[in-house]
Image (cartoon, grey):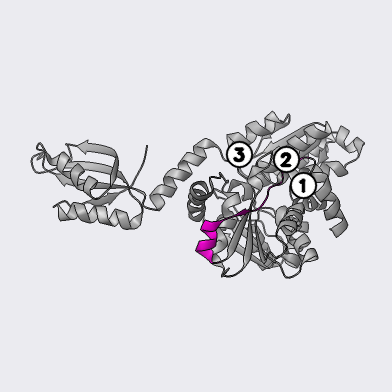
Amino acid sequence: MLTLEKFELASEVVKKVTKPTKLVYSEYLSEQTGGKVFLKPENMQHTGAYKLRGAYYKISTLTEEERAKGIITASAGNHAQGVAYAAKEFGCKATIVMPTVTPLIKVNRTKAYGAEVILYGDVYDDACEKAKQLAEETGCTFVHPFDDEDVITGQGTITMEIIQELPTVDYIFAPVGGGGLISGVATLAKMLNPKIQVIGVEPIEAASMSASLEAGEIVTLDSANTIADGTAVKTVGENALQYVKDNVDMMLTVEDDELIGAFLDMVENHKMVVENSGLLTVASLKQLDLRGKKVVAILSGGNMDVITMSSIVQHGLIQRDRIFSVSVLLPDKPGELVRVADTIAKAQGNVIKLEHNQFVSTNRNAAVELRITLESFGTEHKREILKALEDNGYKPKSISAKLY
């Protein structure tokens, strides 16, 4: 059983390796929601995620004999780094099985902490089965990433810090993958103040906790295809499911496209890089009426590789019409290109890329195609630029935008 005494002990233990992630007030999100929104930036931890808490506390409870056997676990990335870091602190060997699709940054950082990495399977669930098999074969001590009460206790130390800093908090939003974080956060929150509302958030394409709660038993999804790789879990933990049933007030789901917009919001308004799973809480705030409430959104991690980041930024700019492309037809004669550019400039549009296709028609005098990729301030400004082109006799046609 999870007890207040264990949470208090874990809170002291994890201080040896965690950074104090003080709450960050978000003026931007507060204005959007009408509440007072604070961010719990666990993306700023040593390993880039909250997972260090549960991993370190779990290993601290093992016997010397269990540590000497070596530790093995499975992870989509963040738990891997937490275990690798904690194992290094305790001087024991760690082997981590990770899905083959794990972002390179998470693999490399796990190795950098001294762990052996084995890549196996397409999702976390595949890697977990392999890790359990290897634990039986080698005698290593298996550390479950989320369905372990010591791990859950370690993750729950986040709540202790939140309430110490903001005792009057009304809502705590936490991402949900296998259920370890939300179990610890919600259980301690209800122990300390039953009035606190704890909200779990899943990617809609990997909503295994929501499915299990609805069915009243563990449900294994056919797939967990989401850009929120840290929460791409097909089967939640049995212990976690029970703790969620008892202590979580509501589960929400978020579309992948919403995470893209949330990433831009965090970078532009808070100068923070948060991985897609960590953005679930931010993206879900608009689903509830938070007016007049004090809200904490847990940013669970920030381990995102640069290639993924660049793709998210491009898609986000396109999604918000800050980047768009149009095709216009014009006669192939001197001065036409200048006239188009002048029209766009007067509308304060910024040309990023031009493609001139003389072979769109067999009659070049009748028409050549100009494909223009533009930067705007948003949807309304995009409309103004398109209208300016139309007013000058062009018929702009929207086409798929690509920066590169």
Q: Which residue is mark 1?
A: 54
Q: How many angstroms separate mark 3 from mark 1 (CA)?
A: 21 Å
Query: Mark 3 Cα within 10 Å, few/some/many (few <14, many 20+)?
Result: some
Q: Tell me the quarter of the image containing the C terminus.
A: top left
Q: Which residues are magenta?
A: 17-34
Q: Residue at x 83, y 45 (%)?
A: 13
Occupied quadrant, residue 381:
bottom left
Q: Earlier in the sequence, mark 3 or mark 1?
A: 1
Q: Which residue is mark 3?
A: 102
Amino acid, disc 2 = Gly
Amino acid, disc 1 = Gly
Q: Residue at x 79, y 44 (%)?
A: 15
Q: Nearer the viewer, residue 131 or 275?
A: 275
Position of 210 with respect to 67 (left or right) is left
Q: Is residue 14 visible?
A: yes
Q: Which residue is mark 2?
A: 82
Amino acid, disc 3 = Thr
The mark lying in front, picked from 2 and 3, is 2
Position of 222 with respect to 316 (left or right) is right
Q: Earlier in the sequence, mark 2 or mark 3?
A: 2
Q: Earlier in the sequence, mark 1 or mark 2?
A: 1
Q: How many angstroms separate mark 2 from mark 3 (CA)?
A: 15 Å
